[in-house]
Image: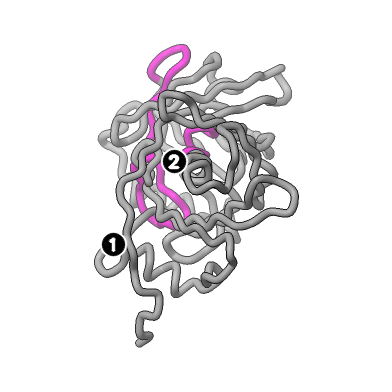
Amino acid sequence: MHGAGNDFVMVDDREGRLPSDDSDFVRRLANRPDGVGCEGVIFVRRSDRLDFAMSFRNPDGSRADLCGNGARCVAAYALEIGAAKSRRMRFETPAGDVSAEVLADGGVTVGMPEPRDLREGFVNSGVPHRIVPVDDLDAVDVAGEGRRIRFSQEFAPCGTNVDFVRWTGPSSLSIRTYERGVEAETFACGTGSVAAALVGVAQHGLAFPVKVRTACGYVLSVDGSWDGVRFSNVTLTGPVKRVFDGAIAIDWPRD
């Protein structure tokens, strides 16, 4: 599936039989030349409290507490496979419980966790994001400059995602993201879109709802409330699409 161009392999593992903690397995699955290829692998697991649990792995096999576009995709997928019983659902993530609604037009809205660590040009919107305003998005060396900031001492030891942003109106922006764990530019990033919108509202005078144009041209909508000190009721809305189904051997030989 993909959410606004952000693509994921979705795995129904409600029986708990697949090796999601095996980094080599995830890397092989996410590798585009000889696996399926994606920007994240999402496992749907059983939950004792909520509709289901979402487990997310980056292409390098590392864990991420939350992925905004992944959460939107997993909501649509969970409804399709019966892990969620209605269009409105709640599910577990390491970043906290997430609410979601699958809309009639095929889009999905997710309620984001309360933002943390808001400071100049930075916020944790489920995962950390450094926001870098630029005048010309096309001219930005996203890979080079993004990697430099991601691994800089300021954000050691865990690093940060890096979002290059151009403010385009009183309630709009365009964005390109260097994503931690992917270690490259991604076509879209949900938590990055939320982070950029929050920084825009708190520090650059933008007003909710904020329209965020992703690198491949899709538009996400970020809404919420800001009282001058804290954000509340933050949501992310946008398109999702199931691209294909397939089967792949999981007993690949190891070198």
Residue 18, horizontal then vertical, whole percent: 52, 70
Disc 2 element: loop
> Nearest the camera: 41 or 50?
50
Tag 1: Cα neighbours inside 10 Å, few (<14), some, or many (≥20)?
few
Q: What sort of colour scheme is used for the picture?
A: one colour
* In magenta stretch: residue 175: yes
Measuring from the top left, give residue 239's x and y in whole percent: 40, 31
Q: For mark 2, what is the residue? A: 189
Residue bounds of the magenta highlight: 168-195
Residue 215 appears in the rendering: yes
Precedes in sequence: disc 2 or disc 1: 1
Residue 151 x/y as whole percent: 49, 57
The relative height of residue 35 versus residue 64 in the rendered view (above or below) is below
- Depth order, front residue of 149/214: 214
Rendered residue at 31%/67% (across/down): 35
Q: Residue at x 26, y 34 (%)?
A: 138
Which labelled disc corresponds to residue 32? 1
